[in-house]
Image (cartoon, rainbow, N blue to C red):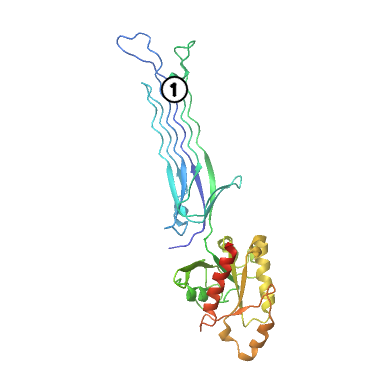
Amino acid sequence: MNFIDTATVDIRSGKGGKGHISFRREKFVANGGPDGGNGGKGGDLIVVADPQLTTLLDLRYKRHYYAEDGNSGEKYNCTGKSGKDLVVKLPVGTVIKNIETDEILADLDTPGKQIIIAKGGRGGRGNAEFMTNVNQAPRNSEPGEPAIEMTVALELKILADVGIVGFPNAGKSTLISVISAAKPKIADYPFTTLVPNLGMVRIGDEKSYTVADIPGLIEGAHEGRGLGVQFLRHIERTRVLVFLIDAASENPKKDYKILCNELKSYSPEMLKKPQIVCLSKTDTVLPEDRKSWSRLRFGGEPALPISSAVGDNIEVLKWKVWEVLEFSRK
């Protein structure tokens, strides 16, 4: 299935039905009173977070979502039938914004969450509602309330506990394939990852957390260079960031600084998250070149050397992430 994480659609609630004008007409009742009924309520447009969905692909093909209008009132004081609500199922993590005002209408951040984003119009009153002691035969009624119409933008933000960031070819996809059951495409060239990958990490008997990796960042990503910036939104909600720095890099500290700058340029809140910095692909580095690692500090902390290929420190990393997650919950 194609991974689509943005869409733009037109939505409209149902308009209220108009009130009816009529008078009782019975064989032995002269000058019967008003009996025009009220119009029915228009349908609401409702969005629901469905954990079975993982993409906004369907919304690329269907661009209009309209709830049903309410029916007009009828004689004999009969209220018109209410319009049916329209329920639109969306992936968990979808944010919906009014394009014109940029107002966030809904944030479907939990499974099953349900929100009315466009309320149906109230039905108009029939002439029976206007009868008074002074006016026994009113000939006026109300139209129903209009529908709410707007164009909305939808953005899917994957919900994960941990986000993995790094340059292209830093080993992110290999790591997520080793620590979880996720099976991303892996190859020895940049930009193998074209979509975010999500995996469940299980440790011990009952402990688990979710991890997401995104296409590699490059310098200038926040300005649109490379692919990673298209998917940075997917690690906005994560509680911990794992940085992967290639152990064979000529300047690991510079690489780390570039990654931090890109995250900060996208959102300053990113750098407030707890971090774990790893030197990845350590199996590709000669033993004599590893001596300098002990002196490296990232944010005042030493980096954790790991190798997904041979399993070095992978279990250590999994437990360290769990400990940081647990601490962040306090």
Disc 1 target residue: 126
Check the picture and name the quadrant holding the N terminus.
Answer: bottom left
Residue 227 visible, this angle: no
What x and y, as percent, mark residue 105?
55, 46
Q: Nearer the viewer, residue 310 or 214?
A: 310
Mark 1 lies on a secondary structure that is: loop
Q: Is residue 89 visible?
A: yes
Where is residue 228 drawn, in percent x and y?
58, 66
Residue 232 % position (x, y): 59, 63
Compared across the picture, whether 28 is left or right of 208 comes to left
Instruction: Classify residue 150 as left or right of residue 256.
Output: left
> Residue at image x 40%, y 26%?
73
Residue situated in front as seen by the camera: 300 or 170: 300
Q: Quadrant of residue 82?
A: top left
267 lies above or below 186:
above
Figure quadrant of the C terminus:
bottom right
Q: Which of the pair 214/159 is nearer the observer?
A: 159
**Residue with the most extreme bottom position:** 288
User: x and y percent of residue 180 in the render?
Assistant: 47, 72
Q: Amino acid at mark 1?
A: Gly
Farthest residue to the front: give it: 330
Residue at image position (52%, 78%) is 315
Total marks drawn?
Answer: 1
Position above or below: 63 against 329:
above
Within 10 Å of the Cα at label 1, are there few (<14), some (14-19), or many (20+) other Cα atoms?
many
Q: Nearer the viewer, residue 245 or 216?
A: 245
